[in-house]
Image (cartoon, rainbow, N blue to C red):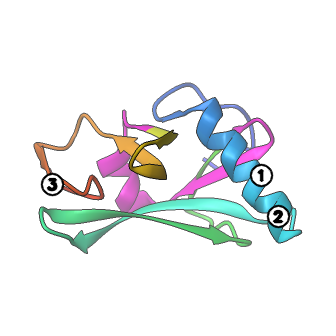
Amino acid sequence: MNAMTEMPSVLVFTDNAANKVKQLIEEEGNPDLKLRVFVTGGGCSGFQYGFTFDEVMNEDDTPMVKNGVTLLIDPMSYQYLAGAEIDYQEGLEGAQFVIKNPNATSTCGCGSSFSA
């Protein structure tokens, strides 16, 4: 799916997360940046989440647009992230992007790795 439209909530990209990404993109001064969310092997539980800014949308990426911000997910990562919620939280432990993933059978204490 390459249509740059609001998508139904197969994956939830919260307003908090979208607004924080928008703020970070404005600070970078590059309106072409998109947030890429991905899953890689590793971490204490087998897989780990990653976030990076990318100017390029690949042909097979799934884009989501929220509050003027584009989130990109590659096909391999999408299968692990379908149904997940991507949020941004600020608390006593600091500020961070958080993924609540119903596909994860277990997670580790750091919150950035999981097993499926």
Residue 48 horizontal side relative to residue 83, left or right: left
Q: In the drawing, does residue 63 fall left or right of residue 75?
A: right
Q: Which residue is mark 2?
A: 27
Residue 69: within the magenta?
yes
Q: Position of residue 87 (x, y in %)?
A: 50, 39
Count of all numbered marks drawn on residues in the image: 3
Circle 2 residues within 10 Å: few <14, some 14–19, many ≥20? few
What is the spatial separation of the Cα atoms under label 3 and label 1, in whole angstroms? 29 Å
Q: CA distance from mark 2 to mark 1?
A: 6 Å
In reply to whether residue 75 is colored magenta, the answer given is: yes
Q: Which amino acid, by three-letter code, is at mark 3?
A: Cys
Q: Give the residues drawn in magenta, as a range.
A: 65-85
The residue indicated by pointer 1 is 23
Q: Check disc 2 and give the amino acid type.
A: Glu
Residue count near mark 3 (Cα–Cα under 10 Å), binned few <14, some 14–19, many ≥20: some
Residue 25 vertical placement versus 106 (above, below): below
The label on residue 108 is: 3
Instruction: Give the image location of residue 38, x and y in percent.
Output: 43, 62
As helix, strand or loop, the secondary structure at mark 1 comes to helix
Q: Quadrant of residue 75?
A: bottom left
SS category of the residue bearing label 2: helix
Amino acid type at mark 1:
Gln
| Marked residue nearer the N-terminal end (3 or 2) | 2
Provide residue 27's location: percent of width, then percent of height: 82, 64
- The residue at 73%/59% (across/down) is 24
